[in-house]
Amino acid sequence: MAEKRTPPVADPTANVEKELSRIVGDMGIVEEASGAYRVKVAHSRAFPWDDVFKQLLYRDFKVEVTKHKADLIIEGRP
């Protein structure tokens, strides 16, 4: 049975880094620095784009997607 996902807005006090790591799983790498989050996308086709964007945008992070060499990077800043 599939894991039931809790919408990000259901728990605004949840640890963002832990939630991002849980959502991303093996599809990327989550790093935190000074309250900002950087997610390196490892498998773009299987990556949970919508859940990661919701996790950041619902908490009023400014989100930017950039390309570094062959990698896609999602950055979320408060």
Image: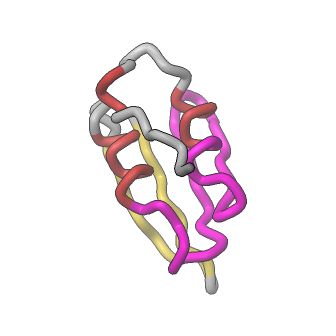
Answer above or below: position of 52 versus 27.
above
State left or right for residue 11 relative to residue 41: left
Is 74 included in the stretch rendered in magenta?
no
Residue in the foreground of this view, choosing between 70 and 19: 19
Question: Whole-percent x and y of residue 8?
Answer: 36, 33
Residue situated furthest front in the rendering: 1
Color style of the picture: secondary structure
Q: Classify residue 56 by image quadrant.
A: top left
**Image position, residue 13 (x, y; %):** 43, 14
Q: Quadrant of the C terminus?
A: top left
Tell me: residue 41, above or below residue 3.
Answer: below
The range drawn in magenta is: 21-49
Is residue 47 a member of the stretch shown in magenta?
Answer: yes
Give the total of numbered labels. 0
In which quarter of the view is residue 70 placed?
bottom right
Q: Residue at x 62, y 31 (%)?
A: 18
10 left or right of 26 in image = left
Question: Depth check: 72 or 4 in front?
Answer: 4
Residue at the image point whose x is 58% and y is 29% from the top = 34
Q: Position of residue 46 (x, y in %)?
A: 54, 73
Q: Residue at x 44, y 40 (%)?
A: 5
In the image, residue 27 sits, relative to residue 51, either above or below, namely below
User: What residue do we see at 41% from left, 65% from top?
Assistant: 65
Residue that sits furthest to the bottom in the current view: 70
